[in-house]
Image (cartoon, rainbow, N blue to C red):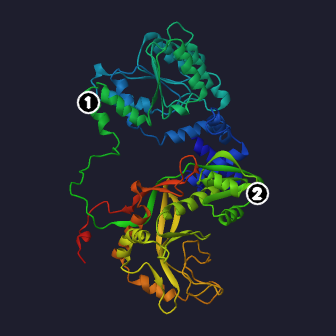
Amino acid sequence: MIRDFKAQIFCRETNLSKREIDTADPIWIERIDAFFRKTLLLPPDGDPTEYAKAFEAVYPQPRHRRQYIDDAISKGTPCFGHKVLGSLMAAGKVDCVFTTNFDPLIEESALSANVILPVPDQHRPAVAAIDSAGRAMRCLNESDWPLVAKLHGDYQSIAIKNTGSELEEQDDQMRHVLVEAGKRFGMAFVGYSGRDASIMEALTAVLDTPAPFPNGLYWLSSSASRLLPVVNEFLSRAQAVGVEVAVVECATFDELAANIIKTTDLPRALFDRVMEGRPTPRLVPVQMPTTEARAFPVLRYSSLLVERMPPTARRIRLAQSTTSAAVRELLKENSVRATVAAQGRELAVFGKDRDILDTLAPLGATLDGEVKLDPVADSWAMGLLYDALVRGLARRLPLIPRYKRAGHSLVIAPPREADDLERARRDAHALSNLRSAYKSDLTGTVPGTGFPFQEGVFLKLDMVDGRWWCGFEPYTFVNIPRAEEPQNGNPGREEFSNADPMGARPDRSGDPAGDWRRERWAQRYNKNWASIIAGWAQLLTNVSGGTKRAFGLEEGAGIDAVFQVSPVTGWSRPGHHHVYFDRTT
């Protein structure tokens, strides 16, 4: 009802037709809620007076409110919970029901349950509203149960309570019945919010009697955290005077009824009637597959799960503001290996503390503990971790990091004449699986041009479904030198400066190695791609346990960037078998 009232007020204030909005659409719900947060036309969401204020804002006249209730009730039918409650009353297992609802669903369910019982065994309910409270008094005085007491009135009553002023006071006789019932019985509160001051005052008054709620209080809610303060205060007072109190979490009225029916001895006829109307269960038994999962087909992703990332980096404070680029240049000039992100006079750094402080001494650098990294919220933290991950993946491998604004990458380092035999042997062993996957050299020169090429992978750090992944895309890098560079220059292990990630020259016409590169990849089909992806995954996670360190610092020397990378790439396969998968060609 509150949602409907808000929609009507929203349409009225924004000059929209209600046909133009969909109150079941989360987008429209959020738009309407945002409107009321800004305009303050109604109390905040969840406020105890929200219902009354909204109802009165839409229907100022009592007769119009009665008509709205009447129209809504005419569409209602008893749910599973109503049928269980009606059967419990018909079986004499529930004495009294107080309700703030206007609909007749409880009494109708009780009457229909009584019909199937022998007349001597029937317990037909008396119904009392605020304009017939004398009937409730008689039931109370004579212990003539069961009783259904309508605290806010019946939909057929002339007086029904909906607005703030109407809900402030409770009819004296109905209040007396509620208080006396609290003195005689325990109570279970099902789905009641506690919004009505008059009802909560009456319940609180029971606590001042000698033996309140002798069989305890049970307050049922979808979540204990959503109870209103007035409810928590009432339960605390009840507990303080010795009442047994319990807050029970239960998602829906139907689920509560299903739990009760399991432990209650109902006459067989009533039990069968109730179970015939139960809703279809969401969970049904299924036959689990017993055949072994097939290895084919599998969709393999070129991405590795980053199971753990560095939570903090070293914080360094400077005497003057600077930029990340300026700091990197200073570190490079002094051959200091570090990864850094600057924010004015503060740096977040991975690397050896002493070397970094010595290099940045002209900027007045001092250590200042650690800085927490939140790559989701802070782009600088994302960039710092991205740079450190690339460095960590390349460490101790024949790989060269290439840091670009368009995306970082790793390329195979070509052998150098200065390398000793042991290093050459170690590098060849590390690249053996990858060389087998490519079925060709991993480095060399492009025929007819003399340009050096190296196989490599583009890298991307990204979050998917709350987990961090390092995606990698194999490509062939061609080092096309600028005019001032020697055409047959052999790239070393330093970072390249080409603007284009593949080595093409945007300032010249076309890519001189483009045709060769396309031809090189044209014949590599799914099976070859799978082998290449597996080869790169093995190379990038070759360290035992998948732990990758950007610098390999000794303990206490500084803060290293340590990543835990899964050696298994992401993959998926069909959730069922089909004869199509049995094909051999």
User: Does residue 562 appear to the left or right of 201 in the view shown?
Assistant: left
Q: Are marks 2 and 1 in contact (CB under 8 Å)?
A: no
Marks 2 and 1, how far apart in space? 91 Å
Looking at the image, which residue sits at the far top?
210
Q: Give x and y (percent) for residue 517.
A: 47, 84
Q: Is residue 503 above or below residue 225?
A: below
User: Does residue 83 appear to the left or right of 553 in the view shown?
Assistant: left
**Is residue 378 among what the camera can see?**
no
Towards the viewer: 155 or 423: 423
Q: Give x and y (percent) for residue 133.
A: 54, 19
Tag 1: residue type? Ala
Q: Give x and y (percent) for residue 154.
A: 53, 29
Q: Is residue 492 above or below residue 396?
A: below
Residue under pointer 2: 362
Report the residue at 57% width, 10% height from top: 208
Towards the viewer: 427 or 562: 427
**Is residue 512 among what the camera can see?**
yes
Looking at the image, which residue sits at the far left?
291
Q: Give x and y (percent) for residue 571.
A: 38, 62
Q: Quadrant of the C terminus?
A: bottom left
Residue under pointer 1: 269
Q: Is residue 189 above or below residue 578?
A: above
Which label's residue is closer to the chain start, 2 or 1?
1
Report the residue at 33% width, 39% height from top: 277
What is the quadrant of residue 428 in the picture?
bottom left
Q: Which mark is residue 578?
A: none
Tag 2: residue type? Pro
Q: Is residue 184 above or below residue 79?
A: above
For label 1, the crowd category at 10 Å Cα-Cα, with few meaning under 14, some 14 to 19 and many 20 or more, is few
Towards the viewer: 445 or 143: 445
Q: Quadrant of the N terminus?
A: top right
